Every structure is written in C-alpha cells, then in structure tokens.
Amino acid sequence: MAHCLRAHCGSAMADGEFSEHLRESLAAAEKLSGIANERELKHIAALQSWLAGEFKKSVDFLESILIDHPRDVLALQIAHLSDFYLGDAHNLRDRVARVLPRYDEDTPGYGYALGMYAFGLEECNEYSRAEQVGHQALEINRKDVWALHAVAHVLEMQGRQLEGIDLYESRTDDWVPDNGFAVHNWWHLALYYLDLQDYDKVFQIYDDMISGGSVALENLDASALLWRLYLLGVDVEDRWSALADKWSESIPHAGYYCFNDCHAMMAFVADGRNQQAETMLGKLEASAHGDNYSAWMTRSVGLPVARAVNAYAQERYAEAAEALASVRYTANLFGGSHAQRDLISQTLIESAIRSGQHKFARALLAERTAKKDTSPQTWLNTARVLDALQCREESERASSRAENLLNRARTSHWQCTNWWLPRERGIPAGTS
Ligand SMILES: [Fe+2]
C-alpha cells in the first residue's frame, strides 16, 4: 500500500510529467501483488488503468473498494480528485455521500470527507448546503484547504466577491504556508479582485503568488488568470512569455490530460508562438485518435477548445464562437470546476462580440446575469453590447448597475478590510 500511496500521489497530479514516478511505484506494488489482498489488488488495478489513460475505469476500481471499505480514505480522496479531473459533478457529491454515514466525528478523516462533500455539493449547484458543510469541516480543521476552497467556490458562483476576499485574507495562516494547493486558492482570491476591476491587486497576486508555479496544476491557474485579462484587453506585459516558456517543457506530455493542454495553448497563442501552438494541436489531434478515455475527452472537448483558443488569438472570432458554443454544455467532460470552465463562456461571449454577433452576445449575457447578477464585469459587457445594438437607455442602465456594484465594493472594501500582501512569495501575512 505504501507503493500504491506513492503512485496515487503521481496520478493525483493529472500531469504526464509524473508518469515515470507513477510507473516506478506501480511496478514496485505489482511485484508484491502475490501477497496483496483483494483491496490492495484493486488499488493496483486503479493505478494501472489511470496510467493507461483509462481514467473512468480507474475510478470504477476505487468505487468498488469504497463499497466494501467506505473508510478507505485514500480510495475516497483519489476517487474525489479523479471525479474533479473528469468533471463528474454528480460523483463529486454522491461518491462522498455514499460513504459518509460510515463516518462520525471520531473517525479519522471525517472532517476531510466533509470538505470533499462540500465541494461536491457546490459543483452540483447546492450552494447553501455546500457553504454550511464547508464551514462544518473548517470548524473541525481550520487548515482544511479543500473545505476552504469549497466555500470560496460558493462565493465565486454567487458573486459575493467581498466575502470571498475576506474569507481568504482573514486567515492566510491557514491555507498558505507549505501547501501545494495554495496557488489555486490565490487564483480564486485574484478572481474576486478581477471582477471588481482591481487589476493592481490581480497583478500583485499573480506576480507574488501564482507566477512561480512549477507544475501543470499551478501553471494552468496562471494561464487561466492571464487569459481572463487578455479577454478584457488588459496589458499583461511580458508575463505570457515567461509562462509560455514553462509550458513549452510540457509539450512532450501533451495528450495525457487535455485540460492542461488547453491552458498551455492559451500561453502559446497569446505569446504569438504559432509553431508551438501548431505542435500542441498536432499532439492533441493524434491523441484524439486513441481509444482510451483520455482520447475521448480530447476528441469531445479538448481539441475543439484548443482550436477555438487558437482561432480567437488569430482574430477568427466567428470560428471561435461557433466551436465554443458547440461544446459549452458538455465541456465538463474534460474536467475542472464550473469556475475554471467559465473561461469557455467568457471566451465565447468575447468572440461573439468581436465577430459582430451582438444579439447572440446579449442572449449569453442575459443567461449570465440570471445566474449571477452581482458581477460588474458582466454588466459592463452588457452595456457594451446594448450600446452596439443602439439600445442606449438599456445600455446606460447596465452601465450604472456596474458602477453601483463597483462603488459599493470599493466603499465596503476600504471600510472593512486591511489589505496587505507580503512581497516575498510564499510567506503569509503575520508570520515570520
Ligand atoms: Fe477551484
């Protein structure tokens, strides 16, 4: 099981760079399979499937363990992360729900199971319950970064930017030091500031806390943040170039997990690296011809999204809009969270606007405000589109809606918070 644990750590990175690490540990576990029990053999089988790109089959083996051994927290944790990588919202929630009755406050891992459940509830849009269960997990362990992240997702989806800022900034000691998940949580904090158009703060977080990432899981947060700024037309100076350098080292692993590859693609095209973008597309096309689960993800979503990203950067906006519109309701199949995949909707809206499809953009923005009516960015885009459609009064109303939200946020923020970010990366406020 120690070899399996080490191998699961490799699979949990969802990054081809860790394949060798995974393969070595798996080989060591396989050598001992003659003395392994049924549960251990299923862990080995789950790892073999993951390595073969049969991600769904891998989770099925883990689920089979959990049916017999609901308190196998390793199987639960890895299955939960796999559900995330496969964008399987129902199982993010229900796989945890199936085992939770077998846990109580005295069971090791109970709080972590609640944190996972909170995230699953959030991905199933059960925001009120997700927030409640997330806080319950944080009461058990205030350093449970996954539970904190589940609450942050609720605040993101509901457009509660100031509460999100306060959630993170009031407790940096809990989630920043020595934590591999900190970059992603910094990314969430930056999203709140982005919606409030505080780009200085966004760049400060990016430069101090996100840009130094070293693995695909961190680099994709960097891409996701810069791409949002790119869509807004904000000058990010030479940041794309540094990020594209890092992604270029991942090219040999392209096709392993296409969610990463699409984020690499953003850096290549935004930095004008057409050759690397073509190489990436070629790798994804080759991968899409495979017959494993990873290939199906690439074929269904990864490749169309990568092509759309490329088309957008080359100002072929109508083509980008058409491709993104065709996958937006099935995009969960290539993994990630609603907040991460929101990039697809944002790129689609901007593509629609830039290709002159203003009525389409207006419809998409209406859909967006129906879900979250406190996003200044959405109201500003709405005003822009209505203006293009000569609906002057409606445009002015949307514009003042955005301005009111921004003014309210600015006033509340300066009154209620004492923003401070250390300049040195990785050192949280208040620690030496
Ligand atoms: Fe997240």
Image: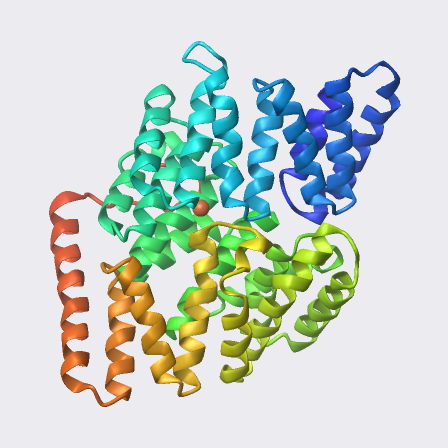
How many marks on residues?
A: 0
Q: Quadrant of residue 422?
A: top left
Q: Which residue reaches farthest top?
A: 106
**For this view, does 272 lie left or right of residue 136?**
right
Position of the C terminus, as image quadrant, is top left
Residue 25: x and y, percent? Answer: 78, 30
**For this view, does 188 lie left or right of residue 197?**
right
- Considering only vertical position in the picture, is 11 above or below 413? above
- Residue that appears at 38% across and 81% down: 353
**For this view, does 403 lie left or right of residue 126?**
left
Residue 207: x and y, percent? Answer: 43, 55
Residue 106: x and y, percent? Answer: 44, 9
Residue 423: x and y, percent? Answer: 37, 47
Position of the N terminus, as image quadrant, is top right
Could you tell me if residue 262 is visible in this image?
A: yes
- Residue that appears at 62% across and 26% down: 75
The residue lying toward the viewer, choosing from 109 and 247, is 109
Q: In which quarter of the image is residue 380?
A: bottom left
- Residue that appears at 49% across and 62% down: 329
- Residue that appears at 88% across and 23% down: 31
